[in-house]
Amino acid sequence: MLVPDLPLRTDRLDLRLFTADDFAALHGYQSRADVTRYLYFAPNDEAASREALARKRARVALRAEGDVLNLALVLRETGAVIGDVLLIWTSVAHRQGEIGYVLHPDHAGHGYATEAAREMLRLGFDELGLHRIVGRLDARNTASARVLERLGMRREAHLRENELVKGEWTDEAVYALLAREWRAGRR
């Protein structure tokens, strides 16, 4: 079980629970076609963003298999919410998890996604005691693949046309990192 002491602080970010006040920031990036291009959903209208915010606000701890911890990425310098990051506890028996992240394009290219995802790896390995953490993505999303590679995750699979997303068959890439690799590299 993991109920983290929040906010988590990285060099430049505070990772905290979502609040009702985060609607405008969340809608600001989830309503963009360039953000949702490789995600499972189309750009959100306001109602869909409100539903997404409600889901994110409920994802506060990892108590059981299938639980999700979803945190807002806050740029400490400005206090702006610039994206979100998550850790999913995918298997208790096999001690496995999954990380994910979404960043507003205005803040891409500065290492924020890598910084936040690294903190989620730390939580998963050091605090939850996971053995293996994966990152799954649309194989066309080269920017996201670079984030996972910077974290030291290895590409383990390229699944051809394994998911029907928004009416088209898409390939999925799977990256992973083991706890012993995490400890050896202390990324």
Image (tube, rainbow, N blue to C red):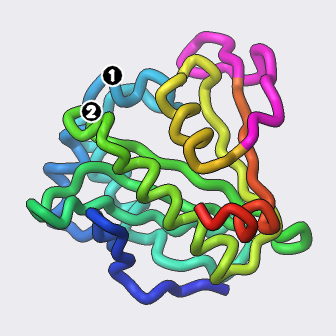
Q: Secondary structure at mark 1?
A: helix
Residue 140 can be seen, yes or no: yes
Which residue is at a point 24% across and 70% down the rendered structure image? 19
| 27 horizontally vs 119: left or right | left
Q: Quadrant of residue 184?
A: bottom right
Which residue is at a point 12% across and 63% down the rendered structure image? 77
Q: Quadrant of residue 68?
A: bottom right
- Residue 149 — which label? none
Residue 140, above or below 42: above
User: Circle 2 sits on which residue?
Assistant: 105
- Magenta region: 154-171
Q: Earlier in the sequence, mark 1 or mark 2?
A: 1
Question: Residue 145's x, y, as percent?
Answer: 58, 32
Q: Contact (CB < 8 A) between labels 1 and 2?
A: yes
Could you say which is closer to the camera, residue 48 or residue 5? 5
| 1 horizontally vs 116: left or right | right
Q: CA distance from mark 1 to mark 2?
A: 8 Å
Q: Amino acid at mark 2?
A: Pro
Neighbourhood count class around disc 1 (C-alpha, 10 Å): few under 14, some 14–19, many 20 upward: some
Q: Amino acid at mark 1?
A: Asp
Residue 48 can be seen, yes or no: no
Which residue is at a point 19% across and 55% down the rendered structure image? 23
In this rendering, the label closer to the viewer, 1 or 2? 2
Could you say which is closer to the camera, residue 11 or residue 16? 11
User: Circle 1 sits on which residue?
Assistant: 34
View extreme (top): residue: 168
Secondary structure predominantly adopted by residues drawn in magenta? strand
Which residue is at a point 68% across and 62% down the rendered structure image? 185
| Viewport quadrant of the N terminus | bottom right
Question: Residue 163's x, y, as percent?
Answer: 71, 23
Could you say which is closer to the camera, residue 148 or residue 90? 148
